[in-house]
Image (spheres, grey):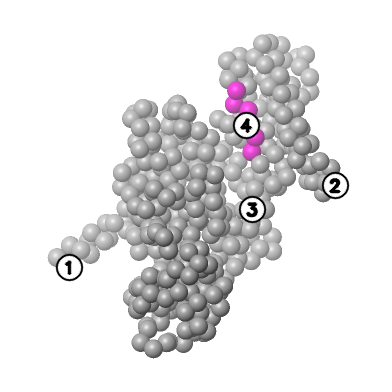
Amino acid sequence: MRHLTGLLLFMSLSIYGQSDCFHIPEGLENRIFFWEKVFTHYSLDQVLIHDSEHPERIYQVLDFRELKARGLLYEKSKKESIQTARNEIRAILGKLAATTDTIHLSKEEKRIRRLFDPNARPSVFRHARICIHTQKGAMETFKAGLIRSGRYVPAMKVIFKEEGLPEDLVYLAHVESGFHPYAKSPAGALGVWQFIQSTGKQYLKIGSTIDERMDPILSTKGAAKLLKSNYQATESWPLAITAYNHGLNGIQQAVISVHSRDLVKMIQSYRSPLFGYASKNFYAEFLAARQIAKNPHKYFSNIELDPPIQYKLVRLPFAFTIREASQMFNVSQEILANMNPALKQAVTRRGKKIPRGYSLRVPVEVKAVGAMIIGPGIGAAIQGF
């Protein structure tokens, strides 16, 4: 039995943990390069006008950095400029769809024409008119997330490794939240891994006093379980990761529709109002983020990642208010709240008790109190306490 258990563990690691599992699918190279540029080259105050189905087809880059610096009705001017540019590009595409005369085109019309195949038919330009999309640069926010990721990546890698999963899955958090613990989406998704409540409850503790979605380390355990489940269902990391955004049921429906597990074919052929720009680009964004995160100095000069978080853990033998815990460990309530982001405001502000058995993070200099057991938690998964 012991040998069988070891064999099963080896098989699990070979399936989930292989180093080359995040290959670049043929046909996705241009998308990955596009997102690499969005994350590292284009500013938040630059807007790319491009094709939603062929993101690398960039018609124009609008630069609002100087306008913002001058403070001249920035948002209004920005909105008007974007709309004007979109209309001009739409008109040019309309003209290209209506004529085969490439000699008498204007300089701008010729430039846009060169973005397409020389033998492109009129229908290609007509379709492109409805695919005009805008994408804001993300250089500053990605760099900030990269710096912030240093606090959590070591602990997250431990968690993925313990699940038998590739450690590089940690870099998906760049796409989800930029490693921001308090990230919140319009749909109500929370935390580094952007769990909505219904999904979060399947993998994490969410109640009146605790919401593990808000804890970067604890929520990683849920993300690992969800990604592992997706992989077991799809047998494909491109699909498993895309399912993190689009939902497993949606990906399985797409597989049935296109009769293929090939993500590139799915992107090219699958038509669903729910399978849009975000879902089609999710895996390419991950691969771009992974490439940047593994070589940060190649893309950003003078960048230094934050050091890993360090703390000790104490499993509470009784329920305590944060005020009582503060007095017991001689640590301010604010520090305890910041170190334990899973504790909801009902605990940190309104006096509800931290549940018995909760593993509370405290500063490394705190000494053992009474019979409570304190152990190290230097960016590590919570174990043995």
Whole-number angstrom distance, CA of label 3 to CA of label 4: 21 Å
Judge the density around disc 2: few (<14), some (14-19), many (≥20) Cα neighbours within 10 Å.
Answer: few
Mark 2 belongs to which amino acid?
Arg
Estimate the x, y position of residue 275 in percent, counting from the top left: 46, 33
Q: Which residue is mark 4?
A: 133
Q: Is residue 187 above or below residue 368?
A: above
Say which residue appears at 47% left-offset and 79% top-offset. Answer: 324
Whole-number angstrom distance, CA of label 4 to CA of label 2: 27 Å
Q: Quadrant of residue 107?
A: top right
Q: Nearer the viewer, mark 2 or mark 1?
A: 2
Judge the density around disc 3: few (<14), some (14-19), many (≥20) Cα neighbours within 10 Å.
Answer: some
Mark 3 belongs to which amino acid?
Thr
Q: Which residue is mark 2?
A: 70
Magenta-drawn stretch, dominant element (helix, strand or loop):
strand
Q: Nearer the viewer, mark 1 or mark 4?
A: 4
Please provide the residue range marked out in magenta: 130-135
Indicate which disc residue 2 carries.
1
Disc nearer the start of the sequence (3/4): 4
Indicate which disc residue 10 carries.
none
Mark 4 belongs to which amino acid?
His
Say which residue appears at 42% left-offset and 63% top-offset. Answer: 210
